Image: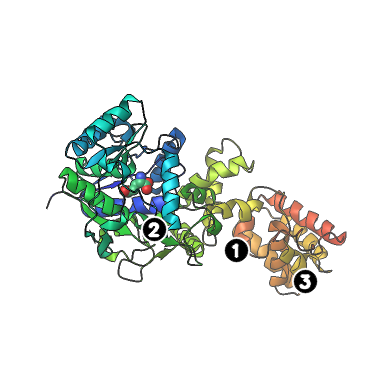
Amino acid sequence: MSEVRTRFAPSPTGNLHVGGAHTALFAWLFARHEGGRFVLRIEDTDEVRSTAESLAAIYDGLHWLGIDWDEGPDVGGPHGPYIQSERLDIYEEHIARLIESGRAYRCYCTPEELEERREIMRARGLPPRYDGKCRALTADETRRLDAQGREFCVRFRVDDQGVTIVEDLVRGEVAFENALMGDFVIQKTSGYPTYHLAVVVDDYLMEITHVIRAEEHLPNTQAHLQLMEALGLAPPQFAHLPLILGTDRTKLSKRHGAINLMDYREQGFLPEAMRNFLALIGWSPGTDEEILSLDELIEKFTLEGVSRSPGVFDLEKATWLNGEYLKRADAEYIADLIEPELRAEGLIEEDLGPERRAWLVAVVELMKERTRLLTDFVVWGRYFFTDDYLYDNRARSKWLSREEVPERLELLADRLEGLESWDVDSIEGAIRGLAAELDVGAAKLIHPCRAAVTGQTVGPSLFDLLALVPQKDVVARLRRTAELGRAGELEPLPEGDAAD
Ligand code: GLU
């Protein structure tokens, strides 16, 4: 069998959406699994909506997910150019061939005329398709209209008999009635080809063996197969991926949260977790496994594993998965990812230096067991970086507003201030020792201490975390909290003002 070649063919008219990223990932995984090649082709035949920013956003999104391409606009390849606006002469040639063979014709109907006639069809309860008015124009009539300088587009003369059968690798055999299809436009008035024409020509010339794309394109395949037949081009195989729904089972949209892939980076997702998550939407390795490394995804990915029924974009699951990746991730790697954010928040200095960097890695190591998003390090872990953190309502109500707490915090401050060495064992010894002297359980000191020094009631091991905050800062925080408590300023806040 010839080498497998798949492609991702985005239109650069916006950000890379999660749906697009999902399609790209599946086409890429299939090519990698098969040891084939993956092509990136930019379909910018919408001259009005295509932008350079969008192209840059597509590159960014694919790079972030770790999807690379063997051929594409920036890397070149034997079937270039890979940007459709640079292939206009190729389309022109194919359109001319179709006109010559009588399978395409110039249509001079104006948008207003078309709309008027569609309106009539709708009123009659008919599907509003092109009625074929210009099909019958003679060469003389065409010449006359051209002489008048009338604008035209080119339409494909569809075969309206029988059915077109799509043999889909995911959906099986799907039949489309040809009588329902109108003669569609293959070249716009501007001279640009339409999506239908360009996609067919390029998939053929770029030797794409498997067209893997979103389900919404399944009906378009009827037009594509007819065009290929008329041009005498052998069709590729098709695999249409299932729809992506939100958890309420409606089509994924902004209502369900971000649909721009890169917003998930902003929200603190790791690219490898997002990739794993997207791979499991509408595909299963055939086992219950949910955490699959890149190598495992490539090894296990098959089109047989792609489901016919819609997949669900479940943000809860994505977040859980991200937490699992964070737990397993190297602390140095996480530190690299959060450094810019910490810097942007003014929580660390411009140049950390080796000692502070080692400290940051230790903070990450301590926190990563409990975090689900990269942003958690910055938000929950704020107390590692500044004294300017909030006391949340649980900390206030459970501990900080209690009468006996300020005094205990003061005693703790004195005890910790006296420590000569600031390490986990000395800190633990001091706190447990004070608890024994006061004849209270250690928890009676540990919990208020955590509430005072972090503003929260949960977090990593207290002794470990105290050792990562400078001794003088811990002491100052204990004294400050004691004072605020005495002044009655640590009562729970009314809802809305609370930090949690
Ligand atoms: N440019 C089309 C899109 O972005 C590509 C569809 C296809 O893969 O054929 O939807």
Q: Which residue is mark 3?
A: 438
Q: Amino acid at mark 3?
A: Leu
Residue matched to label 1: 461
- Please provide percent x and percent y for residue 362: 53, 52
User: Disc 3 on helix, strand or loop?
Assistant: helix
Tell me the SS state at disc 2. Answer: loop
Mark 1 surroundings: few (<14), some (14-19) or many (≥20) residues within 10 A = few
Amino acid carrying label 1: it is Ser
Can see residue 374? Answer: yes
307 over 226 or under it: above or below: below
Percent coordinates x, y for residue 141 in the rendering: 27, 32
Q: Quadrant of residue 63?
A: top left
Q: Which is more toward the observer, 273 or 342?
A: 273
Q: CA distance from mark 2 to mark 1?
A: 70 Å
Q: Residue at x 16, y 45 (%)?
A: 233
Assess whether mark 3 and mark 1 are in contact (beta carbons under 8 angstroms).
Answer: no
Of the pair 348 and 378, the residue shown nearer to us: 378
Label 3, ligand 1: CB separation under 8 Å: no
Of the numbered discs 1 and 3, the one sitting upstream in the chain is 3
Task: Determine which residue is flagged by label 2.
Answer: 126
Q: Nearer the viewer, mark 1 or mark 3?
A: 1
> Residue flagged by tag 2: what amino acid is it?
Leu
Residue at x-position 36% and y-position 37%: 45
Residue 428 in the figure: left or right of residue 369: right
Vertical comparison of 384 with 437: above or below:
above
Number of dots carrying numbers: 3
Occupied quadrant, residue 98: top left
